[in-house]
Structures are given as structure tokens and as C-alpha cells.
Amino acid sequence: MKVNGHPYRSIERDGLRLLVIDQTRLPHRFERIALDSVDDVAAAIRNMVVRGAPLIGVTAAYGLALALARDPGDDALQHACGLLAATRPTAINLRWALQQVVEHVTALPPSGRAAAALERADALAEADVATNAAIGAHGAGLLRTRWEALGRPPRLNVLTHCNAGWLGCVDWGTALAALYRAHDQGVPLHVWIDETRPRNQGASLTTWELASHGIDATLITDNAGGYLMRARKVDACIVGADRVSALGDVCNKVGTYLKALAAADNGIPFYVAMPLSTLDWQTRDGQSEIPVEDRGSEEVTHISGLSDRGTLERVRLAPEGTRALNPAFDITPARLISALITEHGVFPASEAGLAPLRQAATR
Ligand code: MRU
């Protein structure tokens, strides 16, 4: 996608150096930083310099390639895998991408592993772009259908949570890809963006992305969505996902579940956009089986932003000594989800609904 007219991907490779957009500095600074080693990559994922399920998967795949370029032995491969897998526990794409690289290189002699890993990581990055373009096309179709079913109102009000845009993928995004495509096709969108406490991905990233693409949007507090839904000011909700269970339960940024509950109570469709790599066939009951990351209390007790002096600062919100809990994700049961939008089309969120995707996954 374009930033000031220049096309970027959220991760690019220059030889054995990765260039990523530092998402902790957006929207106030657009800075790209270089990652030269597996340790750099692990730190960037852990500290959310890069974030979003598809992007952390691709970045981890590159991290493995960088590790193998320094030491292609079995021990180094195992160590790098462990290091990268431990960075963030919830998004299944991270483990999936690591597995893709490991399967590709394990049988090779050490001398051929680094080049093969790099080739596989490049392929995963390219595939992510194509996948998200397809998700965008299918999602835009759903939004257009909704707009037409409502009698083509002057604007279709869509609520989104967190950032499921190109910043969280290699390009396009998942949920936001649907918005970009619908907008480009002439559906008159207005987007309600949840701020998404405590990391504020909605306030910092989704606002920036949608404005760059010329989409009309309004930032709201996380707690305003229910009120707006009851006031008939939301026509559809669309979010991304970090892991989807075989029964169709959706794990996504904390707060998603409450929005899905409010949407169901108000008869508003709740769509989830995600690539097939986000489906965890080993997991059935999302609530009890998906590990939810606890990101620690300081993200709740403190907040970061741009001061009136123009400096990036972090300030305390809660009294010193306040205990805070910070689960980063929650699980929305399948029964609250109207449809899952994937690169293969639109599917019901249920075991039977997902059955055709199981076949696509094994091809
Ligand atoms: O903690 P984050 O910012 O990595 O969480 C990201 C989300 O929850 C996104 O909605 C999800 O990964 C879909 S990304 C395209």
C-alpha cells in the first residue's frame, strides 16, 4: 500500500537484511528499521515493532532464514525455532510459518538450508499478498451485498476492532482489505474504528491506514460500539483473527467478543476475515484450548503518545502500585459469527461450514 505516494510492504528484504515499519512509532513517525539477525527478529515480534497474525508469521519465517545463514546446523535450527515460537503465543500463523520453513529445510544438507529457508520465506510473503487480495475481493462482495440489501443507503457504517490491515500482514490486510476493495468499487463506506485499548492499534494504526486510503472513518472509544449499534448506526462489523478453531470459534484482539455479543443482540452481521493459515485444526473449543497472551500490567497502567512538545512520551494513568491484568485476546464463540471470509471464499463459522477448507488445507 502507499505511504505518501510511495508503495511499501510491511516487510521487505534486502539480501540478508529485513526492513520493517516500526509500528510502535506510528502514526506519529513513519520509520523503517533493519533486522539483521534472529535475535533482532525475535525482539521485533515480542515488542510489537511488527504485529498482526500474518505479519508475525512471515517475519518469523525470515528470522529462521537469518539464523540458518549464520549456523545451518540442527541445534541452531532448533534453538531459533524455540526462540521465535516463544515470542508470542496466540497467533497460530507464527507456528504455522515456522513449520513451513522447517519442513522445507530439515531434509537438506546444512550447506543448502539458508538459501532454501530464504526462498521459502519469500514465497510465504508473496503468498500472503495474494491471499489477502483474495480475502479483500470476497469481503468486498459481502459488504456490497449488505449495502444493497439495506437499499443502497448514502453510507454503509462498518465497525472494526484493532488493526487487521496491511500493517498486520505483508500487504492489503484481512478485514481492511475488504474495506479497501469495497471502497475502490464504489460502496460508500464510513468506518467506526475502536481505539482498541491498551495498545491502541485502532487509534494509532487503523486510523492512519484508512486515512491514507481516503476512507471516511471515525475513531470511537472501545465502549461506544454497543451504544452505536443500538442507535442503528452500525450496519456491519468486520474484524481479523489470530486463531480460529476447527469449530469456528474466533480468537482475536481483546474486546472482539463484546462487540460480537452486541452485534448479535442488534441483528447486525459480524464478519471475520482471515487466511487459511489462521485456522488451527488441532483446536476445537477456542475458549479452553487457545493460549491467550498476557502482556503484562504496564500496558494498562501506562499510555504512550505524542506530547504537545512533539516528543513521543509514555505516561502513567493509574496510581503507582495498581494491580492490572492484560489478556491481549479473547475468544468469540462461533454462534456469534455471521461468516468467515477467507481466500477461498465465504464460509459459515461451524465445523460443517469449515469442512471444505479442511480439504483445501491438505492440498
Ligand atoms: O496484538 P496484535 O496487534 O498483534 O493483534 C492483532 C490482531 O488481533 C489482529 O486483529 C489480527 O492479528 C488480525 S491481523 C491482520
Image: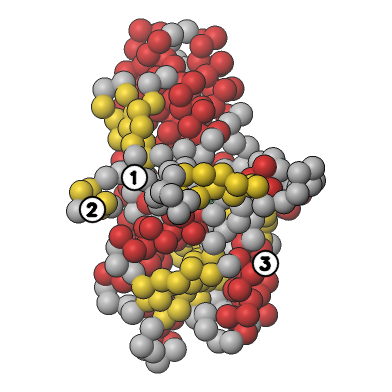
Mark 1 and mark 2 lie on one chain; the one further toward the N terminus is: 2
For residue 258, the mark is: 3
Q: Is residue 123 visible?
A: no
| Residue pointed to by mark 2 | 4
Q: Residue furthest bottom?
A: 151
What is the C-alpha distance between the residues marked 3 and 2? 36 Å
The answer to whether mark 3 and mark 2 are in CB contact below 8 A is no
Q: Is residue 130 visible?
A: yes
Which residue is depicted at the point 42% across and 61% down? 207
Q: Is residue 311 above or below residue 260?
A: above
| Residue pointed to by mark 1 | 30
Q: Of tags 1 and 3, which is closer to the observer?
A: 1
Which residue is depicted at the point 62% across and 42% down? 90
Q: Nearer the viewer, residue 289 or 43?
A: 43
In the displayed structure, does residue 319 sit left or right of residue 150?
right
For residue 204, the mark is: none
In the displayed structure, does residue 176 sit left or right of residue 235?
left
Which residue is depicted at the point 30% across and 35% down? 12
Element at label 2: loop
What is the C-alpha distance between the residues marked 1 and 3? 32 Å
Q: Nearer the viewer, residue 257 or 334?
A: 257
